[in-house]
Image: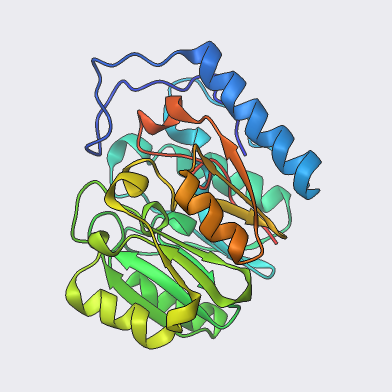
Amino acid sequence: MSAPDYFEVFYAINPWMKTETPVNQELAMSQWQKLKVALKTRAGAKISLVKPVQGLPDLVFTANAAFVHGDRAILAHFKNEERRPEEAYFRSRLEDLGYSLIEPPVPFEGAGDALVYDGRLVLAGYRQRTEVSAHQLISLTFDLPVLSLELHTEHFYHVDTCLCPLDGGHLLYYPGAFDEYGLKVIEANVPEEKRLTVTAQEARNFACNAVQVGRFVFLNQPSARLTEALRRRGFEVVGLDLSEFLKAGGSAKCLTLRLS
């Protein structure tokens, strides 16, 4: 994680970002701290920090830093020039942590666009931020099959904004973010009883941008319907107010990068 010391919206690279909408930085820090504390105290997560850097407001969204699996990581190569200066800081921190690093030759935005499902394959997004050719690098590096899912709406620009693998082979996802072929891929690889869809309103509230650690699922202000659906599947829901980060198109998952 990286604290939001310099978090603000002073450029717009997705439809959620409005430069005329100010960020309440004190509230953003409070919301981020509550997520960090909840991860540690509720789920026993160990948090490694990346030092904030002035002028890099999106450094707080560490999910995009890399795709980490085992002792190796494929670093991000951001599509938007505004975020490219982040790459050096993420590279340095992951080197400090002892990871073997691979640099992609094409745009690739880390765990924002690549998520391991059920320990056996990777669900990977492309079109908006990541080039589909990056998926072959994932497969070759980690010897995992990759299912490529085209993201056809600008609001759901990373796969982690519209899809969240959960333990036990469960999958939380928003069907409206995918084309017909992508939905068929999901349905062919995830059993029906394991699929949990969210509504358009829940998706716009970043319900799929969730973090799961053990039986706990951390997400922004979940609906009563979704909370109950997750509980029926054996998860304990931890609802948090992360509204300041939604102004930049991110939430709980965007604010974290899973290292193990």
Q: Residue at x 35, y 37 (%)?
A: 249
- The relative height of residue 34 versus residue 229 in the rendered view (above or below) is above
- Percent x, y of residue 209: 46, 49
Q: Is residue 257 visible?
A: yes
Of residues 20 and 190, the one drawn nearer to the viewer in this rendering: 190
156 sits to left or right of 211: left
Q: Is residue 187 left or right of residue 177?
A: right
Q: Quadrant of the N terminus?
A: top right
The one nearer the camera, 147 or 101, is 147
Q: Which residue is depicted at the point 53% across and 72% down?
A: 170
- When asked about the image quadrant of residue 150, the answer is bottom left
Q: Residue at x 54, y 50 (%)?
A: 227
State the quadrant of the C terminus: bottom right
Q: Would residue 114 be found to the left or right of residue 227 on screen?
A: left
Asked if one can make out residue 65 in the rendered structure from this viewpoint, the answer is: no
Q: Which sits in the foreground, 51 or 253?
A: 253
Q: Position of residue 70 (x, y in %)?
A: 68, 70
Vertical order, 17 against 234 (above or below): above
* Image: 131 above or below 96: below
Q: Position of residue 8 (x, y in %)?
A: 40, 20
Q: Quadrant of residue 85?
A: top left
